[in-house]
């Protein structure tokens, strides 16, 4: 399961709209735990935008520069957070992982969030958990997204 706040969910969807017709990409920082039922839960506390360095096919591919990924990972660790996932958009395509998405996914236990953006408007958002023990047996599993509404106190 992937848990994130409504503002974070809205921000990653908006990112896809802003970069349309190109893919956006970013990193999800938070904590990963197992609940009592041994269900993996990735709780997102921040979504960090990353630059898509693909120049050959930015409309249907993304790449995060290793230097930027390391910088984001360090920033997260300074806050006690880990990389728990990645997100990107699919301009004018379904929110379903592609063969390329699978081949380029290497962070086992991480959530891979995809938002379909049709004509510049965010549509469906889906998440896929990368499971397995290594590159040879990795697989994507459909993952439930739980969007939590922020509750503000009143005086």
Image: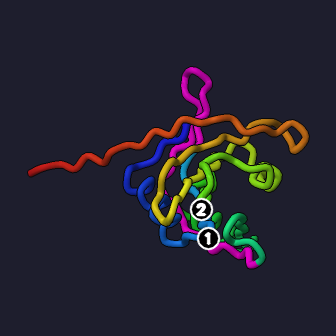
Residue holding disc 2 = 91
Q: Compare residues 140 and 90 and report the one nearer the observer.
A: 90
Q: Residue at x 61, y 65 (%)?
A: 25
Do the residues bearing badges 2 and 1 touch, measured as CB atoms within 8 Å? yes
Q: Position of residue 139 (x, y in %)?
A: 78, 38
Q: Is residue 58 visible?
A: yes
Image quarter hosting the N terminus: top right
Q: Is residue 89 visible?
A: no
Tell me if 20 is positioned left or right of 11 in this view.
right
The colour scheme is: rainbow
Farthest-out residue, bottom: 55
Q: Which residues are magenta?
A: 32-55
Q: Position of residue 72 (x, y in %)?
A: 62, 68
Q: Position of residue 135 (x, y in %)?
A: 87, 44
- Residue 14 included in the magenta stretch of the image: no
Q: Residue at x 57, y 20 (%)?
A: 37
Q: Secondary structure at mark 2?
A: strand
Q: Residue at x 80, y 36 (%)?
A: 132
Q: Residue at x 55, y 68 (%)?
A: 49
**Badge 2 density bin: few <14, some 14–19, many ≥20, Cα 10 Å:** many
Residue holding disc 1 = 22
Q: Which label's residue is closer to the chain start, 2 or 1?
A: 1
Q: CA distance from mark 2 to mark 1?
A: 6 Å
Q: Position of residue 154 (x, y in %)?
A: 12, 49
- Residue 43 included in the magenta stretch of the image: yes
Q: Compare residues 123 and 45 and report the one nearer the observer.
A: 123
């Amino acid at each position: 399961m992937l848990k994130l706040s409504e503002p974070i969910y809205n921000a990653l969807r908006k990112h896809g709209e802003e970069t349309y017709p190109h893919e956006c990409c970013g990193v999800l920082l938070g904590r990963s735990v197992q609940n009592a039922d041994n269900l993996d839960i990735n709780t997102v506390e921040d979504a960090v935008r990353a630059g898509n360095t693909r120049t050959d096919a930015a409309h249907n591919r993304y790449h995060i520069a290793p230097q930027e990924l390391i910088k984001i990972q360090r920033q997260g660790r300074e806050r006690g957070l880990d990389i728990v996932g990645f997100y990107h958009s699919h301009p004018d395509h379904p929110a379903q992982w592609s063969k390329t998405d699978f081949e380029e996914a290497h962070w086992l236990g991480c959530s891979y969030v995809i938002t379909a953006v049709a004509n510049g408007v965010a549509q469906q958002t889906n998440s896929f958990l990368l499971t397995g023990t290594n590159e040879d047996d990795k697989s994507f599993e459909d993952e439930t997204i739980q969007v939590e509404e922020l509750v503000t106190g009143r005086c």
